[in-house]
Amino acid sequence: MAARSSAGSGVVWEPAPEVVEAANITRFMRELGRPSLEALWEQARTDLPDFYRRLERHIGLAWLAPYREVVDLSRGAPFARWFAGATYNASFGCLDRHIEAGRGPATALVAEAEDGTSRSLSFDELRREVCRVAAGLADLGVSRGDRVGIFLPLIPEAAITLLAVARIGAIAVPAFSGYGAPALATRLADAGARVLVTADGTYRRGKFVDMKSVADAACEQAGCVENVVVVRTRGMPTQWDWARDVAWDDFVTGRPEFVPAVPTDANEPYLLLYTSGSTGKPKGAVHGHAGFPVKVIFDQYLCFDVRPGDRMLWFTDMGWMMGPFLVLGALGLGAAAVLYDGTPDYPHPGRLWEVCARHVVTHLGIAPTAIRALMVHGEEVPQRYDLGSLRILGSTGEPWNPEPYRWFSRCVGRDRLPIINYSGGTEVSGGILGCFPIRPLVPCAFHGPVPGMDADVVDEQGRPVRGEVGELVVRQPWPGMTLGFWRDEERYLKTYWSRFEGVWVHGDWASVSPDGYWFIHGRSDDTINVAGKRVGPAEYESALVGHGAVREAAAIAVPDEVKGDAVVCLAVLRPGWEKSETLRGELMAAVVTALGKPLAPKAIKFVDDLPRTRNAKLMRRVARARYLKLPDLGDLSALENPSSLDAIDTAS
């Protein structure tokens, strides 16, 4: 199908000459003698091993022993092994290297809870805490290759545990802090986790969330967890298994302040990150010590221009890819990770902006859905806060709609900051496409592939296409590519490598415009086929959100005897707007104007809420299944707002 512009028109940001001059990517291009992004992309495509060799040397990764080969392809592209022969430890790369360089007193970690209490740790202090936990885990019998579950809110102990597991060569299994017991148990059992680190609970919108009882039930169901370490965040009364449970404070007391980092092999497993599909059990993506941590360092350096002393806040959860991305990427580059354990508009609409101002945040990352929710409070809210420390805005998780994008740029960025749009996935360890602070930006777009990602857009036969929508693919492997699915090699090959020989098919629809901008049009399994014409839900949603009445929308496919698929749009109105047939007609006209009459939706329904994850990602498949009253809604473990299902039942 032909690509429709997702950007609207007009450049929203242009870099000043001094910004271009100071950018990390500019320095790297000059070192390589490459005058442009196009030349950099071409060099990477032509000789990928040399590109990554020069990039890691430019950044100065902290190898414990050097690699003998940049990439080992002896088992083919799906099982590429990067930096073969090297030893690398993510904890050493995030902490020791900076301390040895004299930056021990610099801030490494800042954390704030919903109630406003906060903590700050320097690199020296953070390493001491990490070493204490590493020693405690070792005393529990955890050793190289053992799995440790992390079921924690976004508090300092989550980052400390993530790094402590790396330090002893074990495997971290982060889990979404909002999971119910069955979802958590499934992941713990599949991983075979011996230890779980959890908390008594946390607060969401002023209400205590009892995580310990969830952890207890999950451990009973999983049957593999031998010990549970409990962070007493609020001192709330909890059930206690005296033979199994240990309080965090007791766990770290008396432990040594320094434990040397284990020299783990570059491709030795470090992270087991579970992703959920519409059906079937969750997929456990395996990442090595020089896989995920190295990829996120590369991406933050080139795309987000992260430097020592910066402070990055990403509105996320440790159970999502962007949680480890925040901690391992920022710390790996000598910046500070800012953790906010709360909701962005509670107890008042400016809560997120308040946190950014208080902690002098330089890099703010957030999902488009969260921005749509914050927009309803008005443009004046972020303007009440001093956001002058911000240098880079980031976004990932789903395609943008033009109006929220422009709001984020105008009201938060004050029309002076770039929005680094970033798209990839858990199995990728970061981005396939990105933006760079050295090129003008248009709404919703990407400048192109993250350098070193040999990305392309292809048709059904695997041929490159431009000016129309096709499948997003990657033609060569990259550092950070998952080592495979946990104990399920066949599923891994079928998911990503079965369409075209030697080519990774990511599962996103994408396009490249005539002027060279790239766009994501949504997941290919979300695509709707209307009378033989493929169309992405984001195009309907952008048309609706562009109308001043709609805060958020979801376009879903419903069966149609004539067209195959028809489209129903579920729309959440902004405060102050009332449901009416007149408004419904206006919204229908807006969609027809944007997409054309043949693609007009079958219906537009008003709902009070839509299903989304904790980090505000829209769950279209769940909305569709509920609307169609399907007996199986698929995996609901990441659902943040179960009441949205009832809202869909009463759509009008």
Image (spheres, helix red, strand yellow):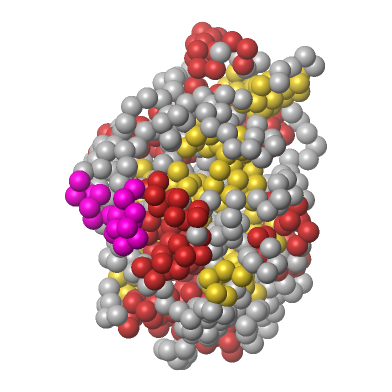
Could you tell me if residue 348 is visible in this image?
no
At a point 68% along the width and 83% down the height, the residue shown is: 243
Expressed as whole percent of the image width and height from the top left, the position of residue 152 reads: 54, 65
User: Relative to residue 577, is residue 626 depicted above or below?
Assistant: below
Left or right: where does residue 410 sit relative to residue 81? left
Left or right: where does residue 35 sit relative to residue 462? left
Expressed as whole percent of the image width and height from the top left, the position of residue 609 reads: 56, 32
Q: Quadrant of the C terminus?
A: top right
Residue in the foreground of this view, choosing between 170 and 552: 170
At a point 45% along the width and 62% down the height, the residue shown is: 51
Residue reaching furthest left? 18
At a point 45% along the width and 50% down the height, the residue shown is: 42
Please tell me whether the stretch drawn in magenta is mainly helix, strand or loop.
helix
At a point 73% along the width and 61% down the height, the residue shown is: 186
User: Relative to residue 35, is residue 10 depicted above or below?
Assistant: above
Quarter-of-image position of residue 165: bottom right
User: Relative to residue 101, is residue 48 depicted above or below?
Assistant: above
Expressed as whole percent of the image width and height from the top left, the position of residue 254 reads: 46, 91
Quarter-of-image position of residue 483: bottom right
User: Relative to residue 489, is residue 521 depicted above or below?
Assistant: above
Region of the chain picked out in magenta, as a range: 17-36
